[in-house]
């Protein structure tokens, strides 16, 4: 066997073993985002999930909104329920210093 051909095949195997990149999209919503804007973002999230992306949904609190952390959690949970039944919520995490919440969703 030719040594150059052997090295080429080894390199080809090594390149084939690279881990796949995680397809992740992020959608940010504000605390006072209007219902029409939420509907539009819901539509975009469903498009991303149809293309097999994972989607991180973040709600950020600014200034005095930071005191309304419970309302922000309720709002993001309502938004996740509006996405539909075929959506799987992987995790919901609280951001540092009452900055808001972040949820990671995928399609079941």
Image: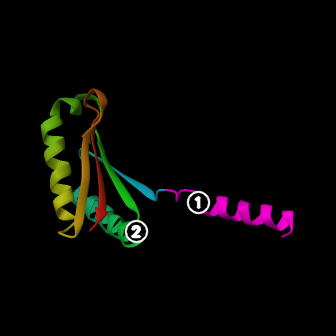
- Horizontal placement of 4 versus 52: left or right? right
Q: Is residue 17 magenta?
A: yes
The quarter of the picture where the N terminus appears is: bottom right
Q: How is the image coloured?
A: rainbow
Q: Provide residue 33's location: percent of width, then percent of height.
A: 26, 51
- Image point 13% across, 46% down: which residue? 74
Nearest the viewer among 47 and 41 is 47
x and y, in percent, of residue 10 in the image: 72, 61
The residue at which mark 1 appears reads as: 17
Judge whether residue 10 is colored magenta.
yes
The magenta region covers 1-21
Callouts 2 and 1 close, C-beta under 8 Å: no
Q: CA distance from mark 2 to mark 1?
A: 21 Å
Q: Give me the residue at 18% from left, 42% from top.
A: 72
Q: Is residue 30 above or below residue 6?
A: above
Q: Which mark is residue 28?
A: none
Q: Position of residue 14 (x, y in %)?
A: 66, 58
Question: In which quadrant of the rendered view does residue 65 lie?
Answer: top left
Residue that carries the numbered disc 2 in the rendered image:
52
Q: Residue at x 18, y 63 (%)?
A: 82
Vertical arrangement, residue 84 with respect to residue 80, above or below: below
Residue visible at 59% across and 60% down in the picture: 17
Q: Earlier in the sequence, mark 2 or mark 1?
A: 1
Q: Could you classify mark 2 by the number of other residues whose Cα lies within 10 Å: few (under 14), some (14-19), or many (20 or more)?
A: few
Label 1 crowd (10 A; few <14 / some 14-19 / many >=20): few
> Which of pointers 2 and 1 indicates the residue nearer the eye?
1
Is residue 43 shown above or below 30?
below
Looking at the rendered structure, the number of numbered marks drawn on it comes to 2
């Amino acid at each position: 066997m030719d040594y150059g051909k052997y090295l080429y095949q080894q390199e080809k195997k090594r390149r084939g073993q690279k881990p796949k990149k995680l397809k992740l999209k992020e959608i940010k919503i504000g605390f006072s985002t209007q219902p029409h804007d939420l509907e539009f973002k819901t539509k975009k999230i469903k498009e991303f999930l149809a293309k097999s992306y994972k989607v991180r949904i973040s709600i950020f609190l600014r200034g005095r909104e930071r005191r309304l952390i419970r309302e922000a959690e309720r709002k993001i949970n309502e938004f996740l329920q509006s996405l539909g039944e075929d959506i799987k919520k992987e995790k919901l995490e609280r951001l540092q210093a009452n900055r808001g919440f972040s949820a990671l969703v995928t399609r079941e």
